[in-house]
Amino acid sequence: MSLVSNGVTLANSLAKSFKLQSTVIHESIASVAGDGTRSYSAPVVRDAVVVRKQKLVKTGTGQMVMSTAYIAFLHPTIVNELDRITLQDGTTAPILNTEGFMNVETGHPVLTEIYLG
């Protein structure tokens, strides 16, 4: 394990201990029909750090858009910009951007950051 992996594991443990995580529902994109209709896989309940704040975020297309929430998964989670995330209060918004540290040994993210808009 790398230093980053160890740090994220410690942060996850502390966030759980201090009840800084809430549950979110993550639905991975399964398919997109020709008319743009999206189908999602079965919902998965995940623990995440959720921060409600506005921040300018650059999307994958290069546009600067105001985000409404920041989400951090402190465990290996792969998120696509077409996925759907539902916050604990039932709100959802498009995923504007995803970031994260990758574990070169496993090829999976150690930390996944998501900006909702």
Image (cartoon, grey):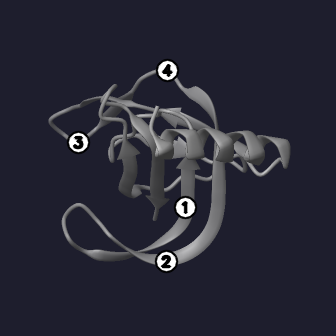
Q: Check residue 11 in the rendering and tell me which mark sits there, or answer none.
A: none
Against 82, is 105 above or below? above
Residue at the image position 52 percent from the left and 44 percent from the top: 85
Q: Which residue is mark 2?
A: 55
> How many angstroms separate mark 2 from mark 4 (CA)?
30 Å
> How many angstroms separate mark 2 from mark 3 (CA)?
28 Å
| Residue type of the residue flagged with mark 4 | Ala
The reply to whether the C-beta atoms of the residues labelled 1 and 2 are less than 8 Å apart is yes
Q: Check residue 36 in the rendering and tell me which mark sits there, or answer none.
A: 3
> How many angstroms separate mark 1 from mark 2 (CA)?
9 Å
* Rendered location of residue 44, percent (x, y): 56, 26
The local crowd at label 4, few if under 14, some if 14 to 19, many if 20 or more residues have their Cα within 10 Å, is few
The local crowd at label 3, few if under 14, some if 14 to 19, many if 20 or more residues have their Cα within 10 Å, is few
* Residue closer to the observer: 85 or 55: 55
| Residue type of the residue flagged with mark 2 | Lys
90 sits left or right of 58 in the view:
right
The local crowd at label 2, few if under 14, some if 14 to 19, many if 20 or more residues have their Cα within 10 Å, is some
- Element under label 2? strand
* Rendered location of residue 23, percent (x, y): 70, 40
- Element under label 4? loop
Q: Which label's residue is closer to the chain start, 1 or 2?
A: 2
Q: Which label's residue is closer to the chain start, 3 or 4?
A: 3
> How many angstroms separate mark 3 from mark 1 (CA)?
26 Å
Q: Which label's residue is closer to the chain start, 3 or 1?
A: 3
Q: Which label's residue is closer to the chain start, 2 or 3?
A: 3
Q: Which residue is mark 1?
A: 70
| Residue type of the residue flagged with mark 1 | Tyr
